[in-house]
Image (tube, rainbow, N blue to C red):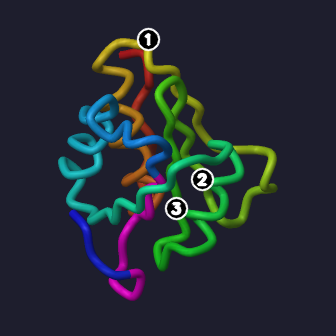
Amino acid sequence: MDSNHSAPAIVITVINDCASLWHEVLLGIEEEGIPFLLQHHPAGEVVDSAWQAARSSPLLVGIACDRHTLVVHYKNLPASAPLFTLMHHQDSQAHRNTGNNAARLVKGIPFRDLNS
C-alpha cells in the first residue's frame, strides 16, 4: 500500500529497491489488518532509517530494509535499540512472523514467536 504520511500506517523505508525480498513481512502486516506505507530511498543505514520511519509514522512503528537486513523499530525506543532485526537468510515463517509482530505492536497484543 502506498499512501500519504497523514494516514495511519506503519512506515516502511525500502533501501535500494529491495521490497520484493521482504514480501512475506508485508503479508504478515496485511494479515493483521494494519496498513503500511512504502517509501523508497537509494541509500541509508537500516537501524537509523527504521527509527526515522517510526518517528514519522502516526502508528509509531517503522521498518527499514536493505538487501540483507530488515529492522522493526518503535518511536519510544532509543534510536540504537530496534525491537526486531531479521536477516534475509532466515526462513519465510520468520519473515511472516516479523510482519505479524510489527502489526501486533500497533494493536498492543502479544507477539508471535519468530521461530515458530
Residue at screen point 52% across, 21% down: 87
The part of the image, by quadrant, that contains residue 56 is: bottom right
Percent position of residue 9, x then y: 36, 71
Q: Local crowd at mark 1 within 10 Å, few (<14), some, or many (≥20)?
A: few
**Residue of label 1:** 89
**Residue of label 2:** 50
Q: CA distance from mark 3 to mark 2?
A: 8 Å
Position of residue 11 relative to residue 84, above or below, is below
Query: Which residues, given as a range, are shown in magenta?
Result: 5-13
Work out which quarter of the rendered image holds the N terminus and state it: bottom left
The part of the image, by quadrant, that contains residue 2 is: bottom left
Q: Secondary structure at mark 2?
A: helix
Q: Secondary structure at mark 3?
A: strand
Horizontally, residue 29 falls left or right of residue 88, namely left
**Residue of label 3:** 61
Residue at screen point 32% across, 37% down: 25
What amino acid is labelled 2 in the image? Answer: Ala
Pick the front one: 113 or 14? 14
**Label at residue 114:** none
Position of residue 20 relative to residue 73, above or below, is above
What amino acid is labelled 3 in the image? Answer: Val
What amino acid is labelled 1 in the image? Answer: His
